[in-house]
Image (cartoon, rainbow, N blue to C red):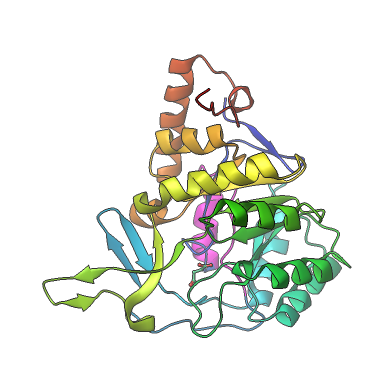
Amino acid sequence: MLTTNFLDFDFSNPFMNASGVHCMTTNELDELAASNAGAYIMKSATPAKREGNPEPRYFDVPLGSINSMGLPNLGFDYYLEYALKQQEKTSRPVFFSVAGMSVAENIAMLKKIEASDFKGVTELNLSCPNVPGKPQVAYDFELTYETLAQVFDFFTKPLGVKLPPYFDMAHFDQMAAILNKYPLSYVNAINSIGNGLYIDTDSDQVVIKPKEGFGGIGGEYVKPTALANVRAFYTRLKPEIKIIGTGGILTGQDAYEHLLCGATMLQVGTQLQKEGPAIFDRLQKELMAIMEEKGYKTIAEFRGKLKAIV
Ligand code: SIN
């Protein structure tokens, strides 16, 4: 059984799309809503519609993907309207993602969500690596602290943050200490590994146009980093803060590993882009098969139970 309780909502399974993949238009969102994903999240919104970076800006490579989308989206109001319509039809909550270009933009969008009838979950994306001239917020620890202080002055609905990957034990400690100060509902680890470079040696050229080819890396390349971030935050955050595991989930085995590290929900990006929403059926079958082989009836029996070597 894959049923998952997350923030007091019950989902049929832990699988979701990662924000940015298959979730920009109402058509794509409707396809996710009709799929076997346990839940789905919308494209990160900015206050107004945004074209994003010049194309080509997404490229599949054998072990994953590189992208520099630059937050193209149809604007905050478009997603709020969609979410409000959806919640009339079903009790399954929608996940809203906001990614303002400044603290003020994030606060303005979150104030609108707070004042609206939106009953779902909100994710504050502090980790987009692809907007020229805008560093990833959550690599600036002071700014993260200040942003969350302003947010929790007024925001009372369930809120998570999407984090970039960290690579240093001291950074896990420092970021967890900041997050533990706030009534956060969850942490989503990880966004793509920012500013990688993929090269096509037939043409001796980069494969995406923005930022001279530098872009966020996803897929198989990122799984060990994603697992480490899930584990590091699971073991450092207060238990009320749940974890969404994102990064390198291509198979039920990858999903199992994220759950073992402590994730409650699981997001799929690169492989959803490659396979489409039918992937959610395959992932569930593969995860169920692993659980059966190991004798687990529920995810709760093994979540977080990664063993150290003693
Ligand atoms: C993008 O739109 O550039 C990707 C979104 C993200 O990495 O947060």
Residue 23 within the segment the image draws in magenta:
no
The answer to whether 24 appears left or right of 6 in the picture is left
The structure residue drawn at horizontal position 61% and vertical position 35%, both measured from the top left corner, is: 12
Q: Is residue 30 magenta?
A: yes
Task: Looking at the picture, tell me which residue is in the foreground, 169 or 97.
Answer: 169
Residue 274 placement: quadrant:
bottom left
The answer to whether any part of residue 38 appears in the image is: no
| x 43%, y 38%: residue | 254
Choose between 117 and 214: the one closer to the eye. 214
| Residue 212, quarter of the rendered image | bottom left
Identify whether 119 is placed above or below 303.
below
Where is residue 305 shown, x and y percent of the image?
59, 27
Q: How many marks?
A: 0
Can residue 211 be spotted in the picture?
A: yes
Does residue 132 appear left or right of residue 170 in this picture? left
Residue furthest left as drawn = 202
Q: 59 or 145, which lies in front?
A: 145
Percent position (x, y) of residue 196? 37, 68
Residue lying at 52% horizontally and 85% vertically, measured from the top left = 133
Query: Which region is colored magenta?
Result: 26-45
Instruction: Point out the image quarter for the N terminus.
Output: top right
Q: Is residue 149 left or right of residue 223?
A: right
- 111 in relation to 270, above or below: below
- In the drawing, does residue 14 fall left or right of residue 47? left
> Residue 79, position in %: x, y?
64, 69
Q: Nearer the viewer, residue 173 or 211?
A: 173
Identify which residue is drawn at 63% across, 84% down.
48
Residue 52 location (% of width, % of height): 48, 81
- State which quadrant residue 6 falls in: top right
Height in image: 119 above or below 301?
A: below
> In the image, is residue 263 above or below residue 50?
above
Seen from this angle, which residue lies furthest right? 153
